[in-house]
Image (cartoon, rainbow, N blue to C red):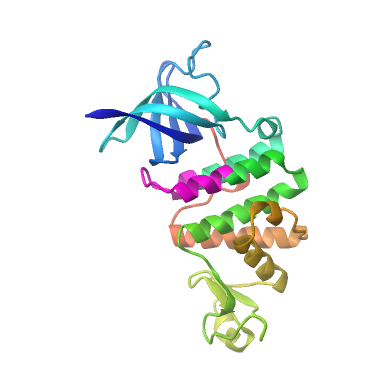
Amino acid sequence: MSRIAKTEAISLKNVSLSGASRYIIALTRDFGKVTLVAKGIKKPKSRFGACLEPFVLSEVLFYHKENRETHYISHCDIIESFSNLRRDLEKIRFAAASVSVIDKVIDHEEKNSVLFDLVFSILTELNRSEESQLFILYLAFLTKLAALLGFQPILDRCLRCGALAEERTHPYFSIVEGGLICSGCEIVASKDRINYKRITPEIREILYQFLTEKFYKNKRRILTDSSLEQLHILLKMYLEYHTDKRIPPISESYLII
């Protein structure tokens, strides 16, 4: 038996069906990730308009059926279109990367309103930020997502001996264990190049700031291109290991298939 459900939704991806319909893979505030069927959405005068396009925050009404993978949409209204983002190809690229990660690592119909707020926050910041700030915002998003999924890295002490960050240098980060390895314990780390990755004090500090500060402060941080790329590789490996899901490169992110 189905019931009418109303919730806020952010479209993650659209999948074309035969005829004029599409699947809308959406993250909702009250139902988690859901697959919605929008009948007739590809028609020129569709009643859905732009409210189910990727990155749009909408209020949707749909027929929710327990133990069903798809649900039919009856109505939707735009709450926030993120218009600046949608006019800028570079912002679209990082927004697509962000929602693609969510689509990959989140299972269907697991309610998580904090996760919904995180996605809304990254889209809000991408919408109003300068191009030079987009990459660091994306990296902050990945760091906050890891913590939200239960994989918050330990950045204030050594995982092996407990030495505090301010007492000793910590040149390695353990992908498997999720935290720092200090100089006194690095002989173990230096023999395992797959699990243990070298980490500079600058990267350790920025990771800590990502976890403890809001997005609007995160984007003010300045990193070299080399540090940004090292941090990207580290976070990608970390999320892939702990979620057992492939995180697509930014250039491979997709919206409509």
Q: Is residue 107 above or below residue 241?
A: above
Prevailing secondary structure class for the magenta stretch in the rendered image: helix
Q: Is residue 224 above or below residue 157?
A: above
Question: Residue 96: x and y, percent?
Answer: 59, 40
Question: Residue 228: x and y, percent?
Answer: 71, 58
Q: In the current view of this chain or complex, which residue is farthest to the left?
A: 1
Compared across the picture, whether 82 is left or right of 194 comes to right
Q: Quadrant of residue 75?
A: top left
Q: Is residue 68 visible?
A: yes
What's the residue at 31%, 36% (across, down)?
Answer: 69
Q: How many marks?
A: 0
Quadrant showing the N terminus: top left
Which region of the structure is painted magenta? 102-120
Asked whether 19 or 158 is in front, the reply is: 158
Question: Residue 90: x and y, percent?
Answer: 70, 39
What's the residue at 42%, 34% (across, down)?
Answer: 7
Q: Is 94 included in the stretch rendered in magenta?
A: no
Q: Is 116 included in the stretch rendered in magenta?
A: yes
Q: Is residue 206 above or below residue 168?
A: above
What's the residue at 69%, 58% (across, down)?
Answer: 229
What's the residue at 43%, 57% (across, down)?
Answer: 244
Asked whether 209 or 171 is in front, the reply is: 209
Q: Is residue 252 visible?
A: no
Q: In the current view of this chain or complex, which residue is farthest to the top?
A: 45
Q: Quadrant of residue 94?
A: top right
Compared across the picture, whether 164 is left or right of 105 comes to right
Question: Residue 79: x and y, percent?
Answer: 55, 30
